[in-house]
Image (cartoon, grey):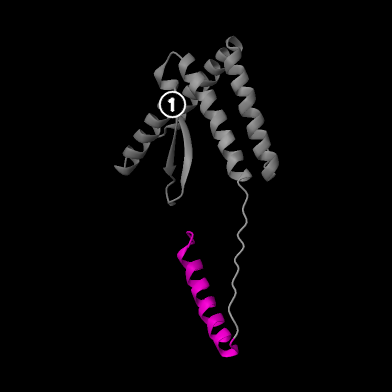
Amino acid sequence: MRYLPLICQSCILLLGTAAGQQAAAADTPLTEAIDVTGNRDDINLQLMVDRAEDTFFELFNELVDDEEFRITCTRQAVLGSRISQRICQTAYMKKELTTAANLSYSGVEYQASAALAEKNRQLRKKTVELLEKNPELRNAALNLNLRVEEYRDKYGINAD
């Protein structure tokens, strides 16, 4: 049997048992059919966005001179959930957020927003400079933008 969630397997077994009892009572053979349909286009669309991001970030990381501005993507379970999500962040973001979490856990109030705001301003400036100088990065950014727009159009997500 192909993988089905446990609850679905239980439902099929219960339905099969009830149907089998009815068929035995009527002395007729039991015929079952389960049709499962799906669409890989939704998964492929998300993978296309992820690949376009990976391409852009890889080029960006090669061009940026400061390690703290390099961007890495990982899959992580978000707090309060077991479902992993793709998280992309710079080294400085990870460092600041880790510091804030550790201090908060220790009972110390720490505001990372001011430090992050300045670093984000510097990151935007570096990104614009690199996009102006490097046509390959510019093309990767355009491709990423197209994939994101395609995704948003498919799911009715506004850019606002």
Q: How many marks?
A: 1
Residue 110 visible in image: no
Residue furthest out toward the top = 133
Q: Give the range drawn in magenta.
A: 1-27
Residue at image position (44%, 22%) is: 70
Q: How far across and how far down the image is residue 84, in percent?
A: 45, 45
Q: In the rendered view, does 151 fall on the left or right side of 116?
A: right
- x%, y% of residue 151? 65, 39
Q: Residue 35's x, y, as percent?
A: 62, 62
Q: Is residue 53 above or below residue 129?
A: below
Q: Is the magenta stretch mostly helix, strand or loop?
A: helix
Q: Name the residue under label 1.
A: 115
- Which quarter of the figure has residue 43? top right
Decide which of 25, 57 is in the foreground and name it: 25
> Residue 58: percent from the left, percent from the top?
49, 22
Placement of the C terminus among the 4 image quadrants = top right
Q: Indicate whether 90 appears above or below 158.
A: above
Three-letter amino acid code at disc 1?
Ala
Which residue is farthest bottom?
25
Query: In percent of the image, x 52 and y 16: which residue is there?
Result: 126
Front in this rendered view, residue 18 or 90: 18
Vertical comparison of 46 with 66: above or below? below
The answer to if 10 sits in the magenta stretch is yes
Which residue is located at x 50 percent, y 24 percent? 57
Q: Horizontally, is 78 left or right of 146 in the view? A: left
Other-residue count near label 1 (Cα within 10 Å), few / some / many at <14 / 14–19 / ≥20: few
Residue at the image position 63 percent from the left and 44 percent from the top: 41
Element assignment for label 1 = helix
The answer, for residue 15, to whether it is visible in the render is yes
**Is 112 rendered above or below residue 128?**
below
